[in-house]
Amino acid sequence: MAWLVAVLALASLLHPAYAMRRETLKLLTAHGTRVIDVEIADTPQEKAQGLMFRTHLDDNHGMLFAYDTPQEITMWMRNTYIPLDMVFIRADGTVHRIEAMTEPLSEDIIASRGDVSACLELAGGAAERLGLKPGDRVEHRLFSPVKGPKR
């Protein structure tokens, strides 16, 4: 039995999510700026793994799925044990759409419903608790800020 515990502990350390790059991003909401620690999923393997098999996620943590070009993004909750909020983000950092409280273990397709360049996954209900809404802004190196008129 002790060997099984040791093998499971080692497997958790080798889990791909533990090797993902960690960065911070800012959510600019009507309630103020919130800093979120994110794991960056930008390889096909990291995107396929996502937050599968996790049993907890704090409100100030998440996973950012990054795409090189804006596109329709589809996600699902296969092997994901906790509800998530999926925040679809345009290339300029604008929150396009939020799918709140997704159903754990569901294989239903969740679509961005428009061209986006990223999906931020947060703990279920975190978007509401953080005051995040469509139209709010996300600041991170992956997003190009909107350029205003030259003066």
Image: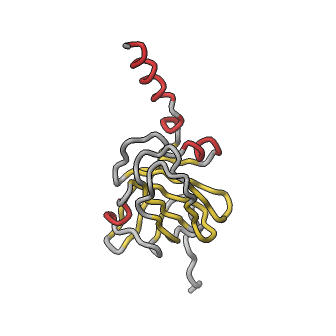
Depth order, front residue of 23/75: 75
Counting every numbered tag in the picture gives 0
Quadrant location, the C terminus? bottom right
In the image, residue 95 lies at what x, y percent?
A: 49, 70
Q: Is residue 8 above or below residue 104?
A: above
In the image, residue 122 lies at what x, y percent?
A: 42, 55
In the image, residue 135 lies at what x, y percent?
A: 47, 75
Tell me which residue sits at (60%, 48%) in the image: 42
Depth order, front residue of 80/150: 80
Quadrant location, the N terminus? top left
Tell me which residue sits at (60%, 45%) in the image: 48
In the image, residue 12 lies at what x, y percent?
A: 45, 29
Depth order, front residue of 17/80: 80
Q: Is residue 26 above or below residue 9?
A: below
Q: Is 115 placed left or right of 137 in the picture?
A: right
Q: Is 4 placed left or right of 140 in the picture?
A: left
